[in-house]
Structure formats: structure tokens, C-alpha cells
Amino acid sequence: MECMIATEQEAIFRRWLGDHLGLMLKVVRGCAATPPDQEDLFQEVSLAVWSSIPSFRGEARETTWIYRVAFNTALTWQRGERRRRVRHETFLKFEMPSPPAAGPAEPPPGQEIVERLYTAIRQLPKVDASLALMHLDGLSYREMAEVAGISENYIGVKLNRIRQQLAEQLKGAKHEL
């Protein structure tokens, strides 16, 4: 897509966002723990996907392309997270007035187990976390192999190991899964 005009890029981006928002959110949720970090990372991923559109030649599936862009962006973002945390911790040492306390909110049914699952996924090595998220999103072994750059057979082996690790980490919640 050489010489792409802005309206074409915007149309593609809107379609991709409509079709693949869940995929992008899973990557974000799998790589960032807190809602503010997730919002920041989502903005970074969205910008990276937007910027990548002129480079997309259609040689890979859109989902494969978006996963690659999202995971690469997330990995880069995580490298800078340590520096951001130091700055935030310094800022938070200042005495700030507390906002008024809100009443206790009831989480939606099953939300606790979903949060525990994402917490466990974030603790996996990055490649394993990305495979777990792709698996949750329903990608085939072939698609996962394209994104990760490893063989389909190895994807199967890795996913079995990942399932065992997650089951071990979520042992107390096993009946809820």
C-alpha cells in the first residue's frame, strides 16, 4: 500500500478497530496490570497499529499483523515501565488529598477468576504470555506460529506447558475454571 491517503488509512483503522478490538485489549490486559497502565498501553498499541497500516502488504492475515504490532509495542512499553514506576512513586510520595470514598462496587460474576487468570498470565515469560493470549483469542496453531516465529508442533508443546503452569498457579480457583 504505497502512497496511501489519510482517508484510506482511517477507513482501514476503523475497520480493524471494529473487527479486532478484543484482540488488542487481550494483549493490553495480558501485559499491563492496572487500569491506568492498560489505558496507556492501549493508546500506544492503537497508535502503533495506525502507524503500521501503510506497511501492511496483506502477506499475513490482519490478525497476525495486529498481534505482532501489539505485542512488539507492549514489549517496548514494558521495558519503559520500570522508569515510569520510579517517576510515579516519587510523585506519589507527595501528600495528596484523598478522593471521596465510593461505595463498594459488586464485581460482575466470574470477574474475579478472569482477573486471577490475567494476573497469572502476566507472570508467565513474555512469549508464553503471548501464546496464552492468542490461544484465548482462538488463533490456530498456524497463526500463532506465524506471530511467534516458531513451529506449529512447538506451539502445541508450549501450550500444554502453559496450561499446566496456569493450572498450578490457579489451583485454588480450579473449580471456577
Image (spheres, rainbow, N blue to C red):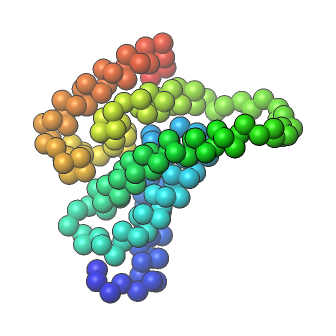
Could you tell me how many numbered marks the image carries? Answer: 0
Q: Is residue 112 above or below residue 40?
A: above
Residue 88 is situated, as x and y percent measured from the top left of the image, at 63, 43
The image quadrant where one finds the N terminus is bottom left
**Residue visible at 44% across and 45% down in the picture:** 78
**Residue visible at 42% across and 57% down in the picture:** 20
Residue 66 is situated, as x and y percent measured from the top left of the image, at 35, 58
Residue positioned most to the top: 172
Residue 46 is situated, as x and y percent measured from the top left of the image, at 48, 61
Does residue 93 appear left or right of residue 71 in this picture? right
Does residue 39 appear left or right of residue 156 in this picture? right
The image quadrant where one finds the C terminus is top left
Residue 100 is situated, as x and y percent measured from the top left of the image, at 87, 38
Q: Is residue 151 above or below residue 172?
A: below
Q: Quadrant of residue 112?
A: top right
Q: Is residue 15 visible?
A: no
Q: Is residue 124 above or below residue 83?
A: above
**Residue visible at 30% across and 35% down in the picture:** 128
**Residue visible at 37% across and 44% down in the picture:** 137
Q: Is residue 60 visible?
A: yes
Q: Nearer the viewer, residue 8 or 32?
A: 32
Does residue 122 appear left or right of residue 132 in this picture? right
